[in-house]
Amino acid sequence: MAKREKLLQSSAAKAARQVAERQTASWARVRRRLRQRGDSDALHDFRVALRRLRSTLRAFRPFLISPKGLRRRLRRLSRATNESRNLEIWQAWVAKHAGKLTERQQQGVRWLRTRLRTQRQRSEARMHAQIAKWFPRLRRELAALRAAARPTPAKPVRATAAVHRVVLTGSSVLQRQLGQVHSMRDRQAAHAARIAAKRLRYLLEPFAAELRGAATIVKQLEQLQYSLGEVHDAHVFADALRDALAEVSEQRARLINQKLLPWPGAGRSSGRAPPPGARSGLLTLARRLRKDGEVRFAALRKEWLDPSKREFWTGLRRLGGKLNRGGRI
């Protein structure tokens, strides 16, 4: 196999096209796996491949000519996979934490699991339909990036300069957002920090082999992303549990109303009454989720929010300095 040209030593436009081409090919391979429906990791890998590609197009947008609205369409497709992914992780959490309940509480948990299974089936059907509809066009538009090129300036911007600028900006955003995270209540700041960590990681990954110290930073960003993702998942689970509790309460109130006032009413809706113990089982899960969320946040605080943990930021600044010097050691 021929040795690849060093990306950092080429122009920003050329590096961006090459990275985008490789990432598009990787995304297409995962798309084939996702279509088979039997690969349990396919959805996760599809989403990661899509995020890598979106990060590249975002970071190098001044150097690429792309069809109008391409990044918006990729973002829309990414969002179309969110619900299925969240339900997948939520189902796994419920299965893990549903033990040691009374029979009465178990009935409520079984009701929740049936509800989640139905939601996921419907969500995945919509997701696969949207991917099938949008993927061919997106693949063609991404392929066009290879042929599209801006007029070469007399002194083209090098990839090192472009990456340095994005690392500088992204590091500042990440540090600012993490500085605003103090508890589980700081949901928006934690979510923004998670996005900033992902963008930095996906930007650096294609260049990690060429820049000493980058692989370590990428690994640390991955760990930070995971810790913030654990907190993010707890927030998403809480949303789902609140919805389930609201539905149980609504159904319970409807049943009581039907017993007290059995006459037909305007706008009367049909609905199967929740099983006995549904509310009790969900409240037990809510208490467990709160405890689990606090444990997740404590791990985030220990590893990333403690002011004494400065090695990562030092390494990131050092990496930025190397990029500023043209990528040399």
Image (cartoon, rainbow, N blue to C red):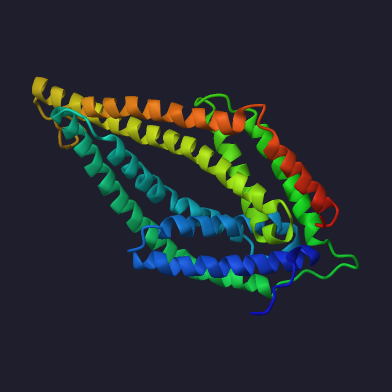
- The residue lying at 44 percent from left, 53 percent from top is 80
Residue with the most extreme bottom position: 1
Residue with the most extreme top position: 260
Residue 268 percent across, percent down from the top left: 18, 33
Left of 273 or right of it: where is 159?
Answer: right
Q: What is the count of numbered marks?
A: 0
Left of 90 or right of it: where is 20?
Answer: right
- The residue lying at 59 percent from left, 69 percent from top is 141
Residue 72 percent across, percent down from the top left: 58, 55
User: Is residue 172 visible in this depiction of the protein?
Assistant: no
User: Is residue 239 visible in this depiction of the protein?
Assistant: yes
Is 104 in front, or is 243? 104
Name above or below for residue 314 compared with residue 139.
above
Name above or below for residue 267 compared with residue 209.
above
Name above or below for residue 283 compared with residue 209.
above
- The residue lying at 15 percent from left, 37 percent from top is 272
Left of 148 or right of it: where is 248?
Answer: left
Rendering quarter of residue 126: bottom left
Rendering quarter of residue 182: top right
Q: Quadrant of the C terminus?
A: bottom right
- The residue lying at 38 percent from left, 62 percent from top is 129
Residue 83 percent across, percent down from the top left: 40, 47
Rendering quarter of residue 43: bottom left
Q: Quadrant of the N terminus?
A: bottom right
Residue 199 percent across, percent down from the top left: 63, 49
